[in-house]
Image (spheres, rainbow, N blue to C red):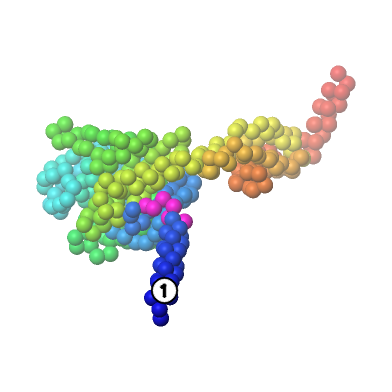
Amino acid sequence: MTKKILCKCIIVALSFSMLFSCLMVKSYAEDDPLAIDAISAVLMEASSGKIFYEKNADTPLPPASVTKIMTLLLVIEAVDDGKVSMNDTVTVSERAASMGGSQVYLKVGETMSLEDMVKSVVIASANDAAVALAEHIAGSEEAFVKRMNERAGELGMVNTNFENTNGLDDTAEKHLISAKDIAIMSRELIRHEKILDYSSIWMDSIRDGAFGLTNTNRLIRFYNGANGLKTGSTSKAKFCISATAKRDGMQLIAVIMGSPTGDIRNAQAKKLLDYGFANYGLYTAPEVELGDITVYGGVERTLPLKYEKFTTVLPKENIKNIRYEVSLPEYISAPVKDGDSVGQIIYMNGEEEIGRTEIYSDYGTERIGFFGVLRRIFLSAILINT
């Protein structure tokens, strides 16, 4: 082979190599347009559960202190169910006091209100307070962890296994959860809006002001609309976060797992939230005047109507194009029960249906009997003759 032919071959080979590299870069960019620097990530809208972005969303990974979202969910549910109170006095066990990592340095036998324990977990990510809460509610951390896994199953968290309440993973072998499952349990937790009162606090204190708490989630202070939720980091899990933020009525949940540093983690969460707020919006349907519906053969001739409110999340450019159609019969037949479905409101984006909501009777009516019909005829005759 001459030197000239060899040079041509090398040039052709380099050209193919460059073309292949370009195609690979393009393919990667298309697969992950945001180029999130983390092992996995999810962006979810809270009211609908719609996912706007995902990367390795179903891969189980060590979650570090993001674990505490489930711990807090069980605590808040116990409060709402009346099993415990925010005013309860929680006594610290030897096990709770022995927890390392992030803590509020609880002492064996120390007592603290359940509310201050919750604040310690939410704001300062206190491992000792997480165990103390678990023991107070379930009697032992083991019993509480069993309930954590049961609740995960109830929520459809199929890639989750908890081994403790706080995410410490030095000895944990299968303490794993996926980014999508973190978004699911975060969504469930923030349904209890009281938790956002704590997770949106930047600085607070416990022990009558003697011990300061500073939020481990820096986005609370530096990101517009941020209102929660939980950070976490260990050498095994790297840096994780479930970050929540609300703007113009839309609540987003951004989950980052396995980011290399805390600053990168926060930047990636902001990138996800920015993407969501820039491209999507909350559509709330306008009021619809329905009037009454005629009832055939009923004690009542007409019945008032009511309907469910409709909201959904859409790409911002579609919101202005939404229209609705009311689907109602000319009449309905008695008997009618309070809350019977009698029709629907259908919401459309062009020719595409984006959702529908039920129309109900506002109250019921029985079928009119023989004597009722006679009475109605008699009264009609009187009105005609007067």
On screen, 201 above or below 384?
A: below
Q: Extreme bottom residue here?
A: 1
Q: Which residues are magenta?
A: 30-36
Q: Residue 8 location, x and y as percent?
A: 43, 71
Element under label 1? helix
On screen, 190 above or below 173?
A: above
Q: Looking at this view, is 55 or 304 the one in front?
A: 55
Q: Extreme top residue here?
A: 386
Res 175 visible: yes
The crowding category of the residue bearing disc 1, from other C-alpha atoms within 10 Å (few below 14, some 14 to 19, many at least 20), is few
Q: Which residue is mark 1?
A: 4
**Residue for point 41% across, 74% down:** 4
Kind of residue sitting beneath label 1? Lys
Res 369 visible: no
Asked if residue 384 lies in the magenta stretch, the reply is no
> Based on the displayed image, in which of its 4 quarters is residue 302 positioned?
top right
Q: Residue 153 location, x and y as percent?
A: 39, 59
